[in-house]
Amino acid sequence: MQGRASSANLARYLLGNPDGDDVVLVAASGDVFTRPQLRAAVAALAESLSQDGLTKARVGIDLSPSFGAVAAYLALLLNGNTVVVARRIDQPPWPIYLASAALDGIIRPKGLRLEGEAFGSEVGYDVPVEGTAEQLPELAPTDPDAPAINLFTSGTTGRPKIVQISHRAWIESTEAILDVLPLGPDTRTTLILSLAHSFGLSVLHTHLRAGGSLYCVERPEFPGDVLRSLTAGGCNALAGVPTQLRAVTTALRRDPDLAATVAVDVVMQAGGRMEVAEATDLLEVLAADCRLFQMFGQTEAAARISILDAADRARVPASVGKPLRGLTVRILDDAGHELEPGVEGEVVVSGTTLMSGYFDDPDATAEVLRDGWLHTGDYGYLDPEGFLYVTGRRSNFVKIDGERISLEAIEYAAISGSPEVADALVSPLPTDDGGLAVKLSLLLAEPLDEDELGDLHKRLRVQLRRGLGPKAVPTEIDTVTEIAYTPNAKKIRARVIY
């Protein structure tokens, strides 16, 4: 990788190496696009966007995994716009979300054509796929602390907030991630993440900067499409959230002959807690020399807070690694006092990659940004060596008779211990005496009759009591036909479909 960049503009930094003709993107159609093509397209689009006044404006974009969308995204950044990133923006709930973003314009990539509006007028541009651009235009000098990107939070518990992150923060984050991850021109990663969320966007940024390429999967929710990217697509790296990686593990276990043809040697995991057993299962179906990098992050910290280097995994497999360069992590109790190593409390972070705040929401900003520290809402602890362990989201714990119970731990225990259970969701349940209990909702792998279902419920209660204690035993267990997830594969706990 190149040395530390001095560019103030994120797009200029990401496209900072004009040399070489490496592949940068492989479309789901099989079309291949190179770095010179991308630079030329970005330069031309930046000029066209500027003519319509889209410089230093607030512009929304439907950031699909396509050459046209990526080129438009970078051109908007190059012009100093604040890019409000969304996906499938004409489908609910995105129109409502974008209505609160005070947009000056919006871009909808459709293949190699861009359509949209700028200051109330319709605009349209063709995305060029030929040409060269030795120099990117300097149309709007950029303040490095100006907001580069606005991202919507995951929205797992309600309407998402809009996170504002500067050019400087994204550049610092990208540099720090590349200090740890072994990405380079030979890396080709299957893109199954949404680019409208911080993990997927950071994968795009690091690959652009490191000279790697991305293989766009048209339907990442289908394991067959993902597996094709790992075989016919020639991908040697994989980035995903636990739900996606579990699906890969299951699919490869079912077809050992196919698994033998997969040459993935790097896996990047973030977007939620992955249990040690799940990580072990994944590595068992991949190449013997595959390296797993487990990460902890948050949109409000430009995607990444810590990374567990693959070299440390055997020694501290339950850790999410050490804080990235430029970041400091502390563990606080409920009164705000710093805790000793090994003692669990809230994870708080300070450093160079934090958001400037939530757009048009000073109260929400003040709640999580206090004296330069981001209060993540995650529980965890540091060990004496400085490795971070995350035990769960504050919102995913309930207190039952004074004992803190993890909803995620109950879900994992139900799924991992019973092949009849395809997925599970645990919800707090008010009791008649004003306390709380838990309710377990099961998504079955196959239909069960009444007696089989009764036996499953009994086994689950015994299993949970033995593994997690009596407070973790649900007072109610039911069956659902769907468990809802956000677009970045996080459970929506407020919505269960019966």
Image (cartoon, grey):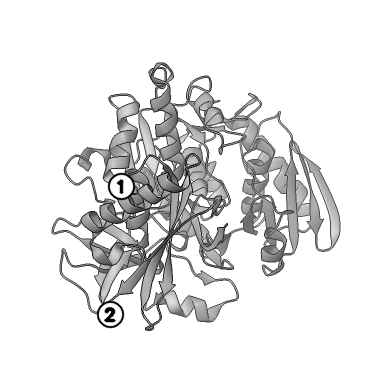
| Residue 181 pos. (x, y %) | 35, 40
Q: Earlier in the sequence, mark 1 or mark 2?
A: 1
Q: Judge by depth and name the residue closer to the eye, 81 or 112.
A: 112
> Can see residue 294?
yes
Q: Amino acid at mark 2?
A: Gly
* View extreme (left): residue: 384
Q: Which mark is residue 469?
A: none
Image quadrant of residue 264?
Answer: top left
**Would you say 199 lies left or right of 335 here?**
right
**Would you say 71 lies left or right of 341 here?**
right
Q: CA distance from mark 1 to mark 2?
A: 29 Å
Residue assigned mark 2: 336
| Residue 62 pos. (x, y %) | 68, 50
| Residue 3 pos. (x, y %) | 38, 42
The quadrant in which the N terminus is found is top left
Identify the residue shown where x is 68% and y is 45%.
72
* Vertical comparison of 295 with 81: above or below: above
Q: Secondary structure at mark 1?
A: loop
Q: Nearer the viewer, mark 1 or mark 2?
A: 1
Q: Amino acid at mark 1?
A: Glu
Q: Which mark is residue 275?
A: 1
Image quadrant of residue 496?
Answer: bottom right
Q: Judge by depth and name the residue closer to the eye, 323 or 379.
A: 379
Q: Residues within 10 Å of mark 1 (few under 14, many from 20)?
A: some
**Would you say 192 lies left or right of 272 here?**
right
> Can see residue 184?
no
The quadrant in which the C terminus is found is bottom right
Q: Secondary structure at mark 2?
A: loop
